[in-house]
Amino acid sequence: MTPPTMSKRERLLALAAGQPADRPAVALWRHFPGDDARPDDLAAAHIAWQRTFDWDLLKVTPSSSYCIQDWGVRAVWQGGDEGTWTYQNTAIQQPTDWERLAVLDPAAGALDQARQAVKSVCQAVGPDTPVLMTLFSPLAQAKNLAGPNLLPHLRQHPDAVQAGLEIITRSVLRFVDALAGTGIAGIFYAVQLAEPSRLSRAEYAQFGQPLDMRILTAAGGFWFNMLHAHGLNVYFDLLAGYPVQALNWHDREGGPSLADGGARFAGALSGGLDRRTVHLAAPDDVRRETADAVQQTAGQRLILSTGCVSMTNSPLSNLWAARRSVDG
């Protein structure tokens, strides 16, 4: 193993700037179902995850419902490998429901619990470990608030949906402000629906992009923000113009490849591993994908990761293969 010559922060900043780094960065993240129902347990799970593997960054992953629970949405974990929760109801049923949403208080309810958890994580791992807090875009939250009602409402009652998205955005902006005192390095901003199977490019440019830009601009005071482009055929060029230091996408599952993406986005490239490989294959397969990712990027600007969350029960041998594969 080659001893590191850079701190985690120095390494990430170099990778984001396209400057030489001592090695690629590496980070995997996952859900912690059950533990994510309680802030102290959520924090403890992430702290143990980081202390075990010493990732170059620690993404804090609350349940996917944390940001909308205070609007009355209920969700449960039903045992899936991914660790995501299943929604039991929707808060939006009629078009008029969008305008009835209230701006959430980040110092109360589920948002405050998430803020407390990430603050505890930052205090425990210390300033040498960059911590990113997961935030979902307004459209991603709207999808879970309305379920199958979202797209019909958006196309038939666009003004009502726009009013609801504005309320969601204001709630996110308040939460970003509240995160400023937690010690995080930045946010992991998860964008959904930016793909032709869900919204046209024009629809995303109207209903998604302006709100994304407002939130990312507000988060510009953090030193390392990562965009997650969720989906297998995303509007990559549109999202590649967002003001973030790193971009994570499903490069192995849907594309574009790391090499292609690296020609279209100037910051750090987060990917290279197929989460199905990490979950179902063998350590040698993980190492082969790592070698290919390094070759595609010439070892520059690479944060070795999966394109979305790792499974909750992936083999430890595969997790360690990913972690150790960048050490030389």
Image (spheres, rainbow, N blue to C red):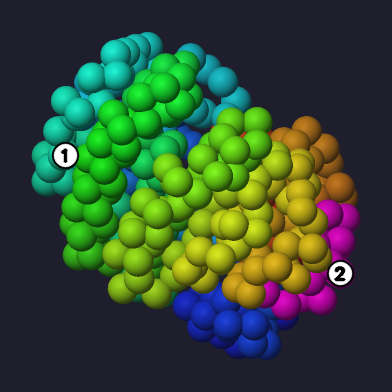
Image location of residue 38, percent across then percent down: 27, 33
According to the picture, the residue beneath numbered tag 2 turns out to be 295
Q: Which mark is residue 172?
A: none
Q: Is residue 153 above or below residue 19?
A: above
The quarter of the picture where the N terminus appears is bottom right
- Determine crowd level at label 1: few under 14, some 14-19, many 20+ residues with C-alpha closer than 10 A: many
Residue 325 appears in view: yes
Q: Is residue 272 above or below residue 98?
A: below
The residue sitting at 30% across, 52% down in the picture is 118
The residue sitting at 67% across, 87% down in the picture is 20
The residue sitting at 51% across, 57% down in the picture is 227
According to the picture, the residue beneath numbered tag 1 turns out to be 104
Q: Does the CB distance between marks 2 and 1 fall below 8 Å?
A: no
- What is the magenta range? 288-301
The quarter of the picture where the C terminus appears is bottom right
Query: In the picture provided, is 152 more to the left or to the right than 316?
Result: left
Q: Amino acid at mark 2?
A: Gln
Q: Is residue 154 above or below residue 231?
A: above
Query: In the picture provided, is 326 more to the left or to the right than 62?
Result: right
